[in-house]
Image (cartoon, rainbow, N blue to C red):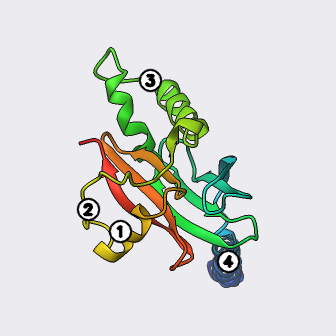
Amino acid sequence: MRTFPFICLLSLLVACEPATKETTTSTSNPVEAQETTADNKKGKIPVIKIVQRTHKFSSASQPDYFRLVLTGDSITTGNVAFTITAADGQKIYEEQFTAADLEAAMVYEMETPTAPIRDREAYILRRMEEFVQEDDFVTPAIPATMRADTAFVSLTTFKAIQANPSATGFKYLLGKEDGRLLVYDPSQKKAIRYGSFGG
């Protein structure tokens, strides 16, 4: 009689052991599947906002396409891809910067030390909308009376742009005071930075 309960207990332990191993194995499989699925989704960054404008820049006859694409998990932590594409489809300029670079100048409009997230988001989106305006284009790009500035281009390139009165410059602001000047250089077949403004 005493051996019967012992045999029952032993049988119960042996019967339970394989079930535990199967459970461990089966629970590890879904984890691997989840990791694989997550890996497959990497690289698909959410697009939050796209702004596109057209304006004559590299050509006097056809407009170029100025495009801003904000991607990321949120507006304030996102990244912006800024591109300029000629009418023939050739990309002549490309730059990446953070949404914070658009937000930084908000400090000059703030009435309190900090701003609510909704105000920060609205400011970034507004900056994107206003990034390419008629007032941002200047012709000639470099006035004949301007002294040579070789901080961004060679003296030869500077003089070539300056000698072309129809060359159009485009200006934009990043950060608080990082004003940038772009112009199309026919010899390089791309837009280049030729100067700065602001602080």
| Separation of marks 1 and 3 at Cα, in angstroms | 47 Å
Sooner in the amino-acid sequence: mark 1 or mark 3: 3
Residue at which label 2 appears = 148
Residue appearing at x 66%, y 85% in the figure: 14
The percent position of residue 184, horizontal first and vertical second, equals 53, 65
**Residue 90 or 121: which is nearer the viewer?**
90
Residue at which label 4 appears = 36
- Please state which amino acid type lies under the numbered disc 3: Pro
**Residue 117 or 91: which is nearer the viewer?**
91
Sooner in the amino-acid sequence: mark 1 or mark 4: 4
Task: Name the side, left or right, on which 110 lies relative to 191.
Answer: left
Labels 3 & 4 near each other (Cβ < 8 A):
no
- Please state which amino acid type lies under the numbered disc 1: Lys
In the rendered image, the residue lying farthest to the top is 111
| SS type, badge 4 | helix
Labels 2 & 1 near each other (Cβ < 8 A):
yes
Residue at which label 3 appears = 116
Task: Name the side, left or right, on which 181 lies relative to 186.
Answer: left
| SS type, badge 3 | loop
- Please state which amino acid type lies under the numbered disc 4: Thr
Residue at which label 1 appears = 159
Instruction: Decide: few, some or many residues near mark 1? Use Cα within 10 Å; few <14, some 14-19, many ≥20.
Output: some
Residue appearing at x 24%, y 56% in the figure: 147
User: Which of the two marks, 1 or 4, is nearer to us in this view?
Assistant: 1
The percent position of residue 179, horizontal first and vertical second, equals 36, 47
